[in-house]
Image (cartoon, rainbow, N blue to C red):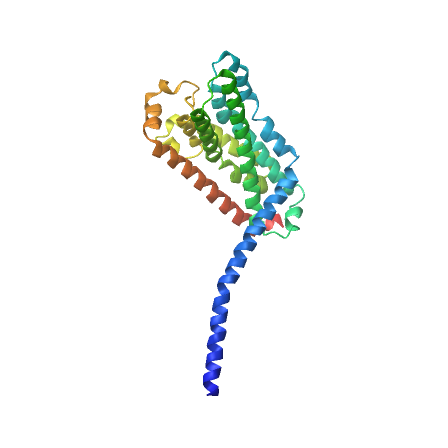
Amino acid sequence: MAFTDRCHATDAGRLGASAQAPRATSTDAQALRATLSSAFAAEVRKFRHAAPMRLALIMALPFPLIALLTAPSGNVSFSPWNYWYVLLMPVAIALFTGCVANADARMRNRPLLGSGAPLGQAWWAKALWCLMLSGLSNLVVLALYIAALAIGGSLSTAAVLTMALAALATTITSAWMIPAGLFLTARAGLLAGIFLPLAVQLVGGFAWSAIPVPQLFPPSATTVIPTAFIPVLPSGEPLAADTVLGGALAANGTLTWAGVAVAALTFVLLTAASAAWFAQSEEVR
C-alpha cells in the first residue's frame, strides 16, 4: 500500500512538472517580447531628437516638394517620386543607419552591454528602428503627394491607395540596406557602413534592365517594383514607353508581390544573421 502511494506521488510530481512546462515556455516568450519591446523603446528614446530622425524627415522633402510646387497647375508629376526612391532615399537610409550603428560603436557598445537586454534583441531593435525611419521618410513623400493631388483637384481614394502601396513597397524593398549597413558599421567602421550598401543599391538600381527578373531580387527590386504602382519607369519615362516591363508589371501582379515578399525575407534573414554575429562577437565586448 505504501509502495502504491509512493508511485502515485511520483506520477503526480511528474504530471505537475509537465503541466508547468508550457507555463515556463509562455513566460519565456513573454520575456522575449518584453525584452525586444524595451530595447526598441530605448532606441526610440535615444534617437528621437537626434540626427537619424532629422535625416529621415529632411531628406524626404526635396523631390516631393517639386511636385507640390507644380500642383496648382493641375499637372502633378510623379517623376520626382521616382528620383526619390532611386537616388535620394538610398542615401538617406545609408546615412541614418550608419548614425544609429555608430552611436554605440563610438562608446564601445557600453550602453548596450549595460542595458541588460540580450545583444541579439538589441540588434533587432536597431534594425526595426531604422526600418521605422525608412517608413517615416516614405510617409512624408506620400503625404506631400496627397497634398499635391488635393491642390491639383485630382485626389481620389484609388490614388491614395495606389500611392500608399507604392510607399509600403519602397520601404520593404529597400530594407536590405539596414542590416547590411548596421553590420558593416559595427564590423568595419562608419564609412564602410554608409558607402558599401549605398554603392550596391545605386549600381543594382541602375542595372535593373540587365537582370531578367529584377522584381524578385534586391537591390533592383527597389527601383522596379514601385513602377507597378506609380506610372513612371525607373528611367523617368512614362510607363507606356516600355511595353515589355510595363506590360509585365501590368499583367502580372503576382510577380510584383513575389518581389516584395523576397525583399521582406531578405531583410529578416540578413537581420537574423547579423544579430547572431553581434550576440557572439568578441569585438563588441
Farthest residue toward the bottom? 1
Displayed quadrant of residue 92 = top right
Q: Can see residue 82?
A: yes
Which residue is located at x 63 percent, y 53 percent? 116
Displayed quadrant of residue 97 = top right
* Depicted 261 relative to depicted 80: above or below: below
Which residue is located at x 51 percent, y 34 percent? 197
Numbered disc total: 0
Residue 148 position in % (x across, y down): 52, 19
* Depicted 101 relative to depicted 143: above or below: below
Residue 157 position in % (x across, y down): 45, 26
**In terms of depth relative to the viewer, which is nearer, 172 or 185?**
172
Residue 79 position in % (x across, y down): 47, 19
Displayed quadrant of residue 99 = top right
Residue 19 position in % (x across, y down): 48, 67
Q: Is residue 36 left or right of residue 108?
A: left
* Depicted 218 relative to depicted 152: above or below: below
**In terms of depth relative to the viewer, which is nearer, 266 or 48?**
48
Q: Can see residue 192?
A: no
